[in-house]
Amino acid sequence: MIDYSKYYSKLATGIKASEVRELLAIISQRKEVISFAGGIPDPALLPREELAEIARDVILRYGDVALQYSETKGIREVRETLCDYLHKKKNIHCEPEGIVITTGSQSALDLIARVFIDPGDIVITENPTYLAAIGAFKNAGARIIGIPLDDKGMRTDLLEKKLMEMPKEQIERVKYIYTNPIAQNPAGVSMSFDRKKHLMEIASEYNLLIVEDDPYSYLVFEEGVDKTNLKSMDKENRVIYLGTASKILSPGLRIGWVVSSTDIARRIELVKQYVDLHSPSLSQIILSEAIKQGIIDKVLAKALPMYKSKRDTMLKAMKENFPDYVWYSKPIGGLFVFAYIHREGFDSGALLKKAIDLYKVAYVPGGSFHVDGHGKNSMRLNYSYPSHEQIHIGVQRLAKLILESTN
Ligand SMILES: Cc1ncc(COP(=O)(O)O)c(C=O)c1O
């Protein structure tokens, strides 16, 4: 038997095998378990017929492009369609030369980390924040500083305070502020317009870049929520905007996009050529046709009322079943409720196996979303994938787990 360990890189050796990840990987085969774990769209929203027709048409009509290798930064016509769409929907101005199409926004997070981070550099994030962004930044050797959030998003007053306290040499090492300003994963909150303005002012004052990760602004179902994108407020070209087709069309297409300055786009392109040459040509053209035919708008017209009512079902079930020492967010959009169980010693990660095996319910332990080792007493709960009935029963099971583990 070969001992492979001496061959592995520090990166591969350093990534800890996570029991949580392994447990969650097998629950899809266990039908009796109700899963609140993934960030998965409701299957009824996937536009099967429309995409089947588009795929057939695209292969027959544009086979020479769709089935071939293509440009690293994305097929030009697709970039043009996307720029148009972002301008119309988000008031984001972009040039086809300033956009790079990526393999989902997860690969954009990885590319951005490779482009900006040297080991020991600093990234500032919300705390809690998207766990796989933390992973991508850490893989590149980043140190992460977390800023608390409340129901108006990142506490920019605390961000400013933090920066004021930091020595100049440390600020020099801050490569970007990563934020998920609208319907944040995992907290489901949105930044108020005043905070967005404040964040842009701080970035300008301290000369910092901002990475705006925006999968969920299309999925805000409450009225009166500010949906202005930071990128649309960006006069100095310091916002790097990430979008994705995953939550509004299909995650299986694996298509995302990064909008930035042409200079940064060029760097991303240079790094990307050695990662995957380009993102799938076929998926790119399918996306562009789906945009032109208004398929995304049709998906969203169904998604918004559906997710709102699923969120309502989850919150109602929580209100009825959870003890009063559980605090949970009231998301204004997106796919998740985030909960803290305020009882000494409650550890959602340590309880996950029991939750799955005994109580037949799964969630993502909240510790992985915190950048400072806190949050062991928290969990992220997805409401987009399970049915109303599953949400109802699953929350009852969770409540039982919480009650039986805390007295
Ligand atoms: C905040 C955030 N960023 C990025 C991603 C990655 O999405 P994808 O790679 O499917 O575009 C997700 C997925 O859940 C997410 O929630």
Image (spheres, rainbow, N blue to C red):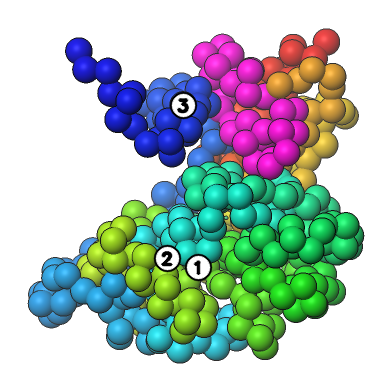
- Tell me where residue 92 appears, x and y as whole percent: 57, 84
Q: Residue at position x 47%, y 33% from top?
A: 15
Which label sits on residue 256?
Answer: 2
Amino acid at circle 2: Gly
Which label sits on residue 333?
Answer: none
The answer to whether the residues at label 2 and label 1 have Cβ atoms under 8 Å apart is yes
Tell me if residue 355 is in the magenta stretch.
yes
First-in-chain label (3 vs 2): 3
Q: Is residue 89 above or below residue 41?
A: below
Q: Is residue 208 left or right of residue 285?
A: right
Q: How much space separates mark 3 and mark 1, taking CA atoms?
A: 29 Å
Q: Which range of residues does the magenta coloring cover?
A: 348-377
Q: Residue at position x 40%, y 86% from top?
A: 97
Amino acid at circle 1: Gly
For residue 280, what is the image quadrant?
Answer: bottom left
Q: Is residue 110 visible in this depiction of the protein?
A: yes
First-in-chain label (3 vs 1): 3
Q: In this view, does 353 lie above or below 383?
A: above
| Mark 2 within 8 Å of ligand 1, using the beta carbon | yes
Which label sits on residue 243?
Answer: 1
- Say which of marks 3 and 1 sits in front: 3
Q: What element carries label 2?
A: strand
Q: Between residue 79 and residue 406, name the one nearer to us.
A: 79
Q: Residue at position x 40%, y 78% from top?
A: 266
Circle 3 is placed at which residue position?
17
Q: Is residue 88 visible in this depiction of the protein?
A: no
- Tell me where residue 393 appears, x and y as whole percent: 61, 28
Q: Is residue 384 left or right of residue 148?
A: left
Q: In this view, does 42 lie to the left or right of 3?
A: right
First-in-chain label (2 vs 1): 1
